[in-house]
Amino acid sequence: MFYNARQDLDYALAFTELYKSESNPALREAKCLAMQVPYVLTPISEDELIVGCMKHGFVGFSPQYGGSYTYYYWDDRVADALEQVKNTVDSAYVEKVEEMRAFWRVENTEAKVKERFAEKYHKKIEYGLYYYAVCRIAGMNVDLDMLVHEGLPGLRERNAAFREKNGDSAFYQALDLSLDVIADACRSYAQNAQKLLEDDGLSEQRRKDLTEIRSNFTQIADGKPRTFKEALQLIWIYAVCSDLMNFGRLDVTLADFYVHDIDSGVMDEEEAIRWLSSFYRAIIRVSKVHDSRIIIGGMGRKNPEAADRLAFALIETSKRVMDVVPQLTLRYYKGMNEELMVKTLENIEAGAVYPIVYSDETIVPSMQKTYGISREEACKWVPLGCGEYIMEGCGAATPNTGVTLAQALDVVLHEGYNSFDGRLEVPGMRSISEYKTFDELFEAYSDMMRPACEEEAYHEQLNYQVAGEEAAYLHLSLLTHDCVEKGEGIFSGGCRYLCATSEIFGLITCADSLAAIKKCVYEDQLFTLEELVKMCDANFEGYEKEREALLNAPKYGNDDDYADDVAIRVFNNISELHDEAGKKTNLYRYNIVSVNNSGSAERGKVTSATPDGRKRGEPLSNGNSPSIGADKNGLTATLNSMRKIDPARHVGVVHNIRFNKDMLHNNFDKVKMLLEIFYENNGVQTNLSSIGKDDLEQAMIHPERYRNLLVRIGGFSARFVELDPIVQHELLLRTTVEEF
């Protein structure tokens, strides 16, 4: 979204000169933010209650905008804008723009990461077979509780106290300037509201709303929030100015404000939901479907009764707004208010895809073990982005790398070559005829993955290193313990738990393939490994009988220990490899996640036929869910397989469960009981939906009739009709629970 080409070019030129004028990274960031924020914030629209939206230009500062981070630059957009204005500007102006283009092509942070990576590994960063890289700082969860209870003045006082303790520095000076940016944004919006109030044609309701908007901004610019609406607005404007799009345990953060205002008559529940709906729509306008998390429930809440009251309002708002964001997430634990789970399932039954449910009973002790922390601190975990775990207010865990295990196995079976496109991926691999036992084959697969994982870990560490050199990430550092306390930016020594995550694709496809090899090749000796590879290369054409044997081999998702044990072995192995690789860097932890999003279909499209019987180009397994059509023993068996994976081996998995509408309605209490048993017995997470297969089929034929059909992909949700056809097909093929 741009004002016009010339205006945006002028801004980009001015931003560039300001950037060049300041060498200190923290002060440079503060000054750049002071220029950027007023330019990119959009005016109040006619339907807004919670106000603020940011447009992005050609060049700027952001933790994660557009897949890049810190100082981003879009050369193609500059080129387009220059083309639009070339007949209205002189040659000197064109020359200035071209000089700016040359500067940012190498100065933007993504380019710096790629250059440093190439220096070490003598190759480009590519979206490749084993590993990919997206330069970004994703999914931050800062201490919003501190924000609303201290307000901007309290953050200034806190900053001053530690400046006095540690000595003055550019970092502390920059923090104060960054707070000025947010306060100025609040004053600007207060003035915007005042100007709109001068319109005599306003409705009575809109006049009342604009008066409240003006009052909210006036208060939070220079004081602490006093009301629920003021606190909610402060959270949002802070998020917009910092490009922060995860909201943590909002029921905890805002509980006191909500209960006070309801009980004192400042507002009623309907009024609260009206403003929460505006908050939701503000998130929708920004449209960061891979983030936008709001967390409710969970252990360790300071006032669970008050928090639950707000949680019910948040669930109801999700039901009424019914969109792909925000990703409302319930942290389940035994003994919580039972109605939260009831309302969750009622939302699912009504066609919503939220709340997503995670189990504190499983995850809290797992985080204790994974992070080496107390139970009290482990209760501060939150899922971010697509489902990775992070410690709220004191951690980072950006997912910038990934491996496709099904493709990795293909490379082993083809002696170092990727059979899909014939590329040599790993020189010098042994002939498959040498693998006389299943264990020998598995060890070859593991050995091949080890250097790839080390390369990934270096890239993660490099991302953080360059980020810390480029900026202090002031707005994130202000609300991340221990940055202000140490006088260091979040990525230059301030962050308590600086972790990273690697995304695992095709996990179960790989596991099922290995189980099929173990059973059909090494145990039953139906054919040799060489013959199996020929079958896969032929996409099983002419090998229908052999393919049937592979399809009938044990599969994960049926509570079959044979298949499940292979899946556990694959999972533990890739987890151990990443852990080993992470220890060779300065990362606190390097963990794996298996959330996948649309990647299971997209990566399946470029993956050859696999030994589990899957054909070339078909979707890979999604997250930790069974391969498509492989779960044949019912929901209970599937859940039993899922809970066998050690939850301390990862920091995020996705389990997709789609119910037939009538089935869920007719077995509501039974489904609720089964899920609760799962959550209380090593179950981690469920993405629940209630959509008939016939609805999906009809939506593909008549998309105009199903514009609002919501589906859960993996780590995010979407409108079904807006998805790529290959992703639609993958969703259509997923198992629907038809009976209990």
Image: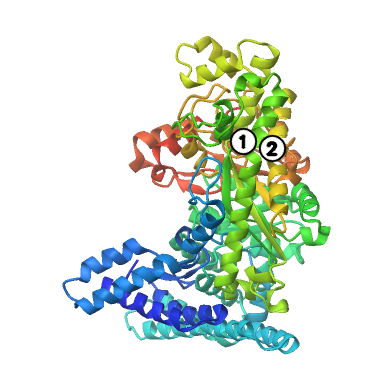
Q: Which mark is residue 571?
A: 2
Name the residue type under label 2: Phe
Give the mark count.
2
The answer to whether residue 318 shows anywhere in this view is: yes
Q: Say above or below: 124 vs 248.
A: above
Q: Give the quadrant of the C terminus.
A: top right
Q: Say above or below: 578 vs 243.
A: above
Q: Which mark is residue 507?
A: 1
Q: Give the quadrant of the N terminus.
A: bottom left
| Residue 43 position within the rendered picture, expressed as x and y whole percent measured from the top left | 39, 76
Q: Residues within 10 Å of mark 1 (few under 14, many from 20)?
A: many
Picture quadrant of residue 466 = bottom right
Residue nearer the viewer, 401 or 243: 401
Q: Are marks 1 and 2 in contact (CB under 8 Å)?
A: yes
Tell me the element at label 2.
helix
Q: Say above or below: 279 vs 561.
A: below
Residue nearer the viewer, 336 or 155: 155
Residue nearer the viewer, 247 or 484: 484
In this picture, residue 518 sits left or right of residue 200: right
Name the residue type under label 1: Leu
